Amino acid sequence: MTQRASGPFSKGHGTGNDFVLVADPEGAHPLSAARVRELADRRFGVGGDGVIRAVPAGSTGDAVLDALPAGTWAMDYWNADGSLSEMCGNGVRVFVRFLLESGLAELPEGGALDVATRAGLKRVVRRGGLLSADLGPFELGGTRLVASAGLDVPRPGQDVSTGNPHVVVALASEEELAGLDLHRAPALEPAADDGANVEFVVPGTIADGVGSIRMRVHERGVGETLSCGTGAVAAAMATRHWSGDAADRWIVDVPGGRLEVELDDRGHVWLTGPAEIVFRGETLSPVP
């Protein structure tokens, strides 16, 4: 079996949450679940927590994305297991970095770029070397019990929607956080209809209106990741709720680095952090 080049790709990450990115400006190369699994495979493919196609809204073939303003760059985001996802907070920043470095968009310092996602339009602003994404309003839901390997008993979890579903669990110590085994998905009672990302957090201090937390996450359709942007937002807003709304700005430390979450006076949550393109290449497909 020989090989042929089948198309260019880029690899990017935001605090270790990594993605395979491909440009499809004509909307001629839709992704499939099988292709996503091939690209995201860390042994037999490029490797990543997800795959993102850059395609203009109106040309995506996805009814939700194509309902957004035509011509807006759409983030056609897929989890590593080939399932679709509504949004990704790290992914949307890496997506914009990809557009900029590929010459598909321009974004001056302080400028804003709107991105079409399955959770609606998201605005990304350039702040020096960092990118900041307006993820819109969040919504607190009910509670459910969460069981995970490494915990002695199930713990209560707070439902938070940030455009996709999350359940946030507070732990008492760094030792508890380090002792989790997140290779398997935590069990939820009651179960979430469409699954959920599960964040485990250890709240830190609150000083001068700024809070801090440390977090690990199991992402639905992926497994444990080094970071989750919407998960950092959910974790910060759940901790804010538990603290009696004591702070509107939160520093979130994840295994892959540090993110900043801030609630503005409109009730929108901003996620700020690094986004990098680390290499480019050509994918190869077998020729029978």
Image (cartoon, rainbow, N blue to C red):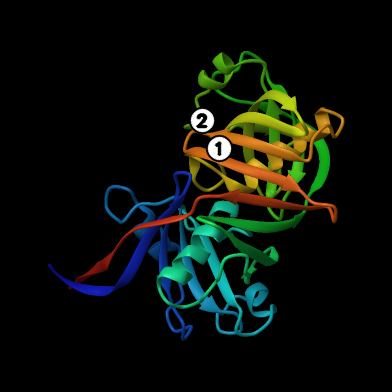
Q: Position of residue 107 (x, y in %)?
A: 55, 71
Q: Secondary structure at mark 1?
A: strand
Marks 1 and 2 in Cβ contact (< 8 Å): yes
Q: Position of residue 23 (x, y in %)?
A: 42, 74
Indicate which disc, 1 or 2, sits on the residue closer to the N terminus: 2
Residue 225 appears in the rendering: no
Task: Indicate the quadrant where residue 122 lies.
Answer: bottom right
**Mark number for residue 218?**
1
Q: Is residue 271 left or right of residue 266?
A: left
Residue drawn where x is 57% and y is 17% of the image? 174
Q: Residue at x 40, y 51 (%)?
A: 48
* Image x and y of residue 56, in percent: 55, 80
The residue that appears at 64% across and 36% down in the rendered structure is 251
* Residue 234 seen: yes
Question: Residue at point 85% right, 56% down?
Answer: 266
Amino acid type, callout 2: Leu
**Tag 2, which secondary structure?**
loop
User: Quick check: 119 above or below 232?
Assistant: below
Q: Which quarter shows the N terminus?
A: bottom left
- How many labels were placed on the picture? 2
Three-letter code, disc 1: His
Per the model, the C-alpha gap separating discs 1 and 2 is 6 Å
Which residue is the site of mark 2?
Answer: 182
Q: What is the x, y in percent for residue 53?
A: 47, 70
Quarter of the picture containing the C terminus is: bottom left
